[in-house]
Image: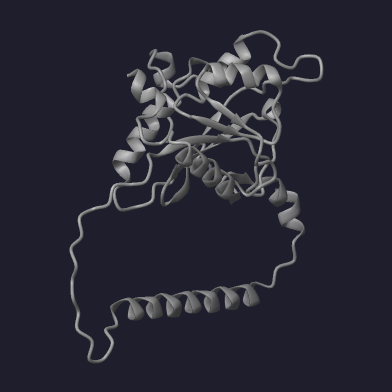
Amino acid sequence: MPLIAEAEHGTFYGLMGQRSPTAQELKNLQDACEGDMNMMRHCRQCRADAVGMLGEDRGAEFTLEKVEAMEIDHEAALARRLAFREQARAELEARRARAHAVPTGAQVISLHRPPRKPAGRAVLMAVATKGSGLVNEHFGYAREFLIYEATESGAQMVGHRRTDKYCGGSETCGDGDSRIERIVRALDGCEVVLCARIGYEPWSRLEAAGIRPDAEHAMEPIEEAVMAVWREMLKAGKLQSAAPGERRA
């Protein structure tokens, strides 16, 4: 979980001058701790009142006023919950039985093959989204980017990066250099930004920073769009060497 170390929040670390970890430092720590378990990477802060799905906050649909107005049949809800739990247990036991079953008369032969080298390296991509699992946000209006790691085995959400909107309105889009510079710093380590639309000026600034803008997959499911871009990079021979940041190091 990110350390809150900004002095304006009045926390101990902030007042003592301890800096917050960078997004890449946080990801490196999560990668080291993950092991054989999936790491919960989407949490923004500890929020016991959070409602929704990964990258999709639905808290507005369940305000106290709306909850108080709900009419709930608690006995029926409990019955559905117990039935679902029993169904899940039965499906789990069936999968375990199939995994360990050996056909009658079959001979089990263990083959030890040398590990295959992955087809290409991992790539971090930032996604501008309004929710619904789609690439559906304009770059200039994004306050947050979901970060996906694409590998040969698929796309996995590994975090999020908050930043200021590039556009503050029709007359203040991209005013000054500090706004795009903060966005570039927030996207450190990412090689691609997927969004619904993006203007020429931010496009140029991102490219100059080594980040490829991509608006070709607007309104597509995020995982499909991320993997499509990864396969394009693989076909172009861009995934055989180290990432740009690693080469600079």
**Residue lying at 71% horizontally and 55% vertically, measured from the top left:** 67
Nearest to the observer: residue 14 or residue 222: 222
Q: Residue furthest right?
A: 170
Tell me where residue 192 appears, x and y as whole percent: 53, 31
Tell me where residue 121 appears, x and y as whole percent: 37, 39
Q: Residue furthest top?
A: 176
**Residue lying at 52% horizontally and 41% vertically, measured from the top left:** 232
Quadrant of the rendering where the N terminus is positioned? top left
Please say whether residue 3 is visible from this viewpoint.
no
Q: Establish if 6 lies above or below 92.
A: above
**Image quarter of residue 2:** top left
Query: What's the colour scheme?
Result: one colour
Q: Residue furthest front?
A: 236
Q: Establish if 152 lies above or below 205.
A: below
Nearest to the observer: residue 140 or residue 2: 140
Q: How many marks?
A: 0
Tell me where residue 100 appears, x and y as whole percent: 28, 78
Please say whether residue 44 is visible from this viewpoint.
yes
Nearest to the observer: residue 96 or residue 6: 96
Q: Establish if 149 lies above or below 25.
A: below
Q: Establish if 197 lies above or below 81.
A: above
Tell me where residue 16 appears, x and y as whole percent: 38, 14
From the viewer's perspective, tell me whether residue 115 is left or right of residue 2. left
From the viewer's perspective, tell me whether residue 93 is left or right of residue 201. left
Quadrant of the rendering where the C terminus is positioned? top left
Q: Residue furthest bottom?
A: 104
